[in-house]
Image (cartoon, rainbow, N blue to C red):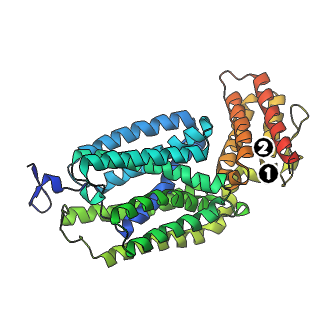
Amino acid sequence: MDTTTDTTTGRRVVGEFLNKVPAITATFWLIKILSTTIGETFADFLAVQVGLGTAVTDGAMLAVLAVTLFAQLRTRRYTPWLYWLTVVLVSIVGTQITDFFTDQLGVSLYLSTAVFAVVLAVVFTVWWFQERTLAITAIDTPRRERWYWAAILVTFALGTAGGDLATEALSLGFRNGVAIFGGLILLVWLARRLGVGAVPAFWVAYVLTRPLGASLGDLLTQGRSYGGIGLGASVTSLLFLTVIVVLVAREQALVLRHGVRVKGDRPAVHPGRDLAWAGGGAVAVVAAALLMAPGAATAVAGPVLVQPAQSSGSSSGTSAAASDATSPLGDLRPFAAITDDVAARVKKGDLKGARARVKDLEVAWDDAEAAIKPASPSGWHTMDSAIDETLTALRANPQSPADCTRALTALQGVIVTLDAKS
């Protein structure tokens, strides 16, 4: 039987007993929830703020995940920083898979949720028949670890689809999402205390942490006018990343200090101390959010704060600035103002300025998605498609004034039509 030497303690450890995943502690769950938000906001940051676009971002994240996962599978022991980096990247890719089916292919969230649930059941079934265990305390062979990461990827896709189904298709919103998914996780914990098996309890909770983390992230990032705290995506991501780095660094230090934990070993630290660290991390997030929210409230809206009166007119006479706050998606006037401003620049022949200004529309629309999409998913998709066509036309190389005008006119028409449905 293969053996390896723990370089920290110098003891010989049987290879099959080297578990490749962390112990399930309070710190584990906090890092998992925070990683979910980081994964989602970072992908949006690259695609929108950096301007890489969805296709490039998706390809880049898949490539980085492949390299990181390969490194994770090649290691012989649990390495906290590598493990959690892999989790964040799996979170990104799992979310992108669901978004691709929903936004690009138009697959119903009801269908995608059902499909991912079936896929996860198949993964668990085959994994069980091959290994006779689904316990993450026994991820101690290469094959078991491969099944583990396959399951993790599907849980993120399922969690994304199920979370979007609840908050968007069922119009529950992100505030209710925090309460609902947090409550469901609490019920899982209570069920575990009443005797439900550790393995099913873990996997159910693991799926639920994905929509909980996304709803929590939306609550912090969305502007106050949408019912959020108003931190903005960048501040929230930085805050969560800071807490994750501190907690993962502590985990890494424990591994270096105490060596590899094998089956039957006592935890490296007392559970109460771990709970204190997790509680401290959670308190730090809440305190920082409350302290930074007032100053960040105006930053989150960014270009959305442009008033309709500042519009310079439109290229077709179909100005969208006359819209009001009663459309199915709520107040579309900020987006209408930017659209009319871009159209006015195109009309003047300032295509370069129009291309730069349309970035404001993209960022504003992306920032507001979590808050306004649940109000009318069909209306959101209609306007989202019109915005995508506008972005494509304005960013074409070379630019066509006729195509830009056509796309902007269509977008203005969509805004007016949505407003007429109020």
For the residues labelled 2 and 1, say whether their Cβ atoms are less than 8 Å apart.
no
How far is disc 2 from disc 1 in space, using C-alphas? 19 Å
Dividing the picture into quadrants, the one containing residue 392 is top right
**How many numbered tags mark residues here?**
2
Q: Residue at 85% across / 49% down in the picture?
A: 308
Quick check: 40 left or right of 244?
right
User: Helix, strand, or loop for circle 1?
Assistant: loop
Mark 2 belongs to which amino acid? Answer: Ile
The percent position of residue 273, horizontal first and vertical second, equals 32, 77
> How dense is the environment of label 1, judged by Cα within 10 Å: few (below 14), some, or many (20 and up)?
many
Above or below, comparing residue 401 to residue 313 in the picture: above
User: Helix, strand, or loop for circle 2?
Assistant: helix
The percent position of residue 192, horizontal first and vertical second, equals 39, 71
Mark 1 belongs to which amino acid? Answer: Pro
Above or below, comparing residue 399 to residue 137 in the picture: above
Specify the farthest residue to the right.
Answer: 317
Residue in the foreground of this view, choosing between 294 and 233: 233
Q: Label 1, on which residue? A: 328
Q: Label 2, on which residue? A: 338
